[in-house]
Image (cartoon, rainbow, N blue to C red):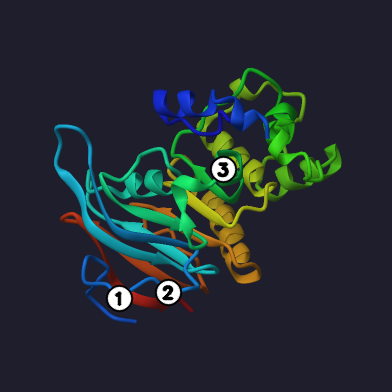
Amino acid sequence: MECWNIGTKFTQYFSDPLFHHSNCKGNELGSNTVGKQPDHIIHFENVSFAYPGDKVLFRKLSLGITPGTFYHVKGPSGSGKSTLLRLIIRLEEPTQGRILFNGAPLADTYPPHLRRAILYLPQTPVAIDGSVREYLLLPFTFKANQDLQKPDDSQLMERLKAFLLNDIHLNDHAQTLSVGQLQRLCFIRGMLLSPAVLLLDEPTSSLDKQSAAIVIDHIEKLCKTSSLAILMVSHEEVLPGSLKFRSLMVADSKVSEIFGIQEIT
């Protein structure tokens, strides 16, 4: 799916026919973390990772992601924030250790089901050579998603208006849209699949203040009304206004919970 701009590895992965067939400040979540809890939808078990010839980004990381929780992922540039998300969606593989999804090894999950259950939205999405309608409905062309109810034009337009995209028509060419418009379209399209985990890499980076607030408001509502687990990488302090969340710092080859569970009122 062209929603992700993630390079050659992604292109090769999705060319596989299978896809089309179908409260503790400073508490380090590292090698000394207690064992996996049964309610973790995603769990890192002693995961280490380094790009070839580069520094180690993660060393014996153990980290549990809980359903219905919002995680704000922050840290210095190059610390591994985006890589953390890429490991969850299997765009990168651990050098050591393993990652579990619903208690089973992530590597054993059928790829089309993984892409439906875990949604990854990159900072810079890529448009398909087609209409806005085709862009939004692309996931429904895959065999693995044939059991989903495809939305009609009126439902799609309602979602566009909710994200301040009133000036966009379903017949417009997707490649004529701005990055900010594509970010919102990509978010809309992904949520049509009702994922269990949402991975957001700088989702408001190309949006004005009003549009960013709309996206964050929708994320907040999703987290309050469903069991969706959300991890959002952001350099900006654009956070839900009345939602409990966990703030994670990625630095020095580990992930630390720096503020515990927070609630902004």
Q: Residues within 10 Å of mark 1 (few under 14, many from 20)?
A: few
The residue pinned by badge 3 equals 110
Q: Amino acid at mark 3?
A: Tyr
Q: Which mark is residue 19?
A: none
Residue at x 39% of width, y 66% of height: 64
x, y (%) of residue 31? Answer: 21, 66
Q: Amino acid at mark 2?
A: Gln
User: Circle 3: is it few (<14), some (14-19), or many (20+) Cα within 10 Å?
Assistant: few
- Type of the residue with mark 1: Val
Residue occupied by mark 1: 34
Mark 2 element type: loop
Q: Is residue 104 visible?
A: yes
Element class at badge 3: loop
Q: Say which of 4 and 215 sits in front.
A: 4
Q: CB under 8 Å between callouts 1 and 2?
A: yes
Q: Residue at x 35, y 58 (%)?
A: 73
Could you say which is closer to the camera, residue 264 or residue 208? 264
Residue 69 x, y percent position in the rendering: 50, 69
Question: Going from the N terminus, do you reach mark 3 or mark 2 first?
Answer: 2
Residue under numbered circle 2? 37
The residue carrying pointer 2 sits among few (fewer than 14), some (14 to 19) or many (20 or more) residues within 10 Å by Cα, namely: few
| Inter-mark Cα distance, 3 to 2 | 23 Å
Mark 1 or mark 3: whose residue is earlier in sequence: 1
Q: Would residue 97 appear left or right of 140 to someone viewing this image?
A: left
User: For the N terminus, which image quadrant?
Assistant: top right
263 w.r.t. 94: above or below? below
